[in-house]
Amino acid sequence: MAKRKPKYAVDKNKSYEAEVIDLTYEGMGVVKIDNYPLFIEGALTGENIRFKVIKTNKNFGYGRLEEILTESPDRVEIENKIYSNTGTMPLQHMTYEAQLKFKQDQVSNNLQRTAKIIDIPVYETLGMDEPYGYRNKAQIPVQMVDGALETGTYRQRSHDLIPLEDFKIQDPEIDRAIVIVRNILRKYQIEAYDEVALTGLIRHLIIRRGYYTGELMVVLVTNGSHLPHQEEIVDEIIEALPDTVSVMQNINDKNTNVILGRKSHVLYGEDKYRDRLLDFTFEISHQSFYQVNPIQTEKLYQTVIDYADLTEDDVVVDAYCGIGTISLALSRHAKQVYGIEIVEDAVQNAERNAAINQVDNAKFFVGASEEILPQWAEEGRQVDVLVVDPPRKGLEEDFIEASLIMAPERIVYVSCNPATLARDVKYFTENGYQAVKAQPVDMFPQTLHVESVVLMTKE
């Protein structure tokens, strides 16, 4: 009887040996069997490995790493497999130098392949001296485990909670605060929300901490407005965590994966805590976006300032400005800064932050950047430098068209997604702009994410 030929170049559930020739943007090793690519989690470029095929389709497949036959010099011993299972540190098996190179390559490859820009210098990724313990914000899911409220993180691609107290990449004081708050809630027998039965109360614990100030904000995300033993719980949190300046209750009674609801109550202090960046003081509310890595944020913002190359006569638009962190950093160097932000609370924070820092040349507007900028373009407003820091989806076409009409001399694009960055840069370079240089910044060590800054100038 003739031997069956595999439907593809490989058979599912069969083991193979191959050399890893590349990494995907998700950090998976790439091997080829008869020109058929397979992606292997945990494998590094240059390694010879044995793997089992676990999934195949027409164009590519996936394998599970079984044995490393020849190890890469970029490999290090992992801290704990739990960080891989949860996806919190997917690059922990890679030396930090290799992580920085991987992220530089992500930015460079996207600009070359998508934007078709071959000659733009993409500088070495700006890294950290100590690439752990950097996160100043934690959003921790909770579940009932063996009858007790438990904190941790979800297993990848699931809502199965893995109990965890040391997250490695979070500020250790935040890790400590999570355990303390959890134990107080346990003491008063507060039950975790059950997303299947739609019962229970606590959905998430959120802890935010000022890196330079040490101020703590505790947010209890609940399935309803009534919090049993509220006074006792808050009093014990304040006693156990004396740096706490704000305790918030956020109410999310919807059957949704969205963490925060629209309603909230102040249980202690005010809806704010403070931190500092580049010698500015910022007030941050529980709903407001604030970069999670303060050390690297200062490097990122300094790059923005350098690329903007402002004079005292320049008018700047800072789109997607959040609580005004970049706007205020630019205000020292410009004639006028206009910030645009869709979240009203963030704009209120931005206005307050301008007042706190005695900045009188920054003005903020509530609304979608892709709606406000076209209005300003129609009005014929002048802008010398445009700074954008959009969400992962990148810029809307209406926004880019309005930018082209306003024709700023320089555009500084801050991006958290190399793919949409390259797509948008391509649009600009096809319509009168030149991409000058790019600087990756490692805001999220041990993870796949990279922030980058690109300068474009009008031709």
Image: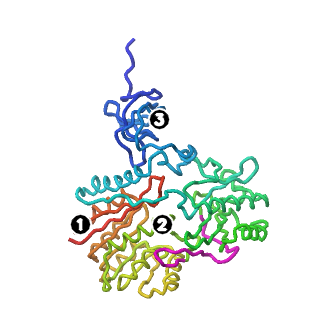
Q: Is residue 333 left or right of residue 120?
A: right
Mark sitting earlier along the chain (2/3): 3
Whether tag 1 and tag 2 are in contact, CB under 8 A, the answer is no
Q: In which quadrant of the rendered view does residue 442 lie?
A: bottom left
Quarter that holds the N terminus: top left
Q: Is the image coloured rainbow, by chain, by secondary structure, or in one colour?
A: rainbow
Query: Which secondary structure lies at badge 1?
Result: strand
Q: Amino acid at mark 3?
A: Leu
Amino acid at dot 1: Gln
Q: Residue furthest top?
A: 1
Residue 65: give its label. Answer: 3
Q: Residue at x 30, y 70 (%)?
A: 401
| Closer to the eye: label 1 or 2 | 2
Contact flag, marks 1 and 3 (Cβ < 8 Å): no
Measured in 3D between alpha carbons, the distance from the residue under mark 1 to the one under mark 3, in whole angstroms, is 43 Å
Q: Residue 253 placed where, x, y %? A: 66, 63
The kind of residue on which mark 2 rests is: Ile
Provide residue 241's location: percent of width, then percent of height: 69, 68
307 in relation to 331, above or below: above
Give me the C-alpha separation between circle 2 and circle 3: 35 Å
Q: Which label sits in the foreground, 1 or 3? A: 3
Q: Is residue 393 visible?
A: no
- Magenta region, main secondary structure: strand
Which residue range is magenta in the image? Answer: 260-282
Within 10 angstroms of label 2, few (less than 14), some, or many (20 or more) residues? some
The disc, 1 or 3, on the residue closer to the chain's N-terminal end is: 3
Read off the residue under disc 1.
Answer: 434
Q: Which mark is residue 295?
A: 2
At numbered mark 2, what does the secondary structure look like: helix, strand or loop?
A: helix
The reply to whether residue 290 is visible in this rendering is yes
* Badge count: 3
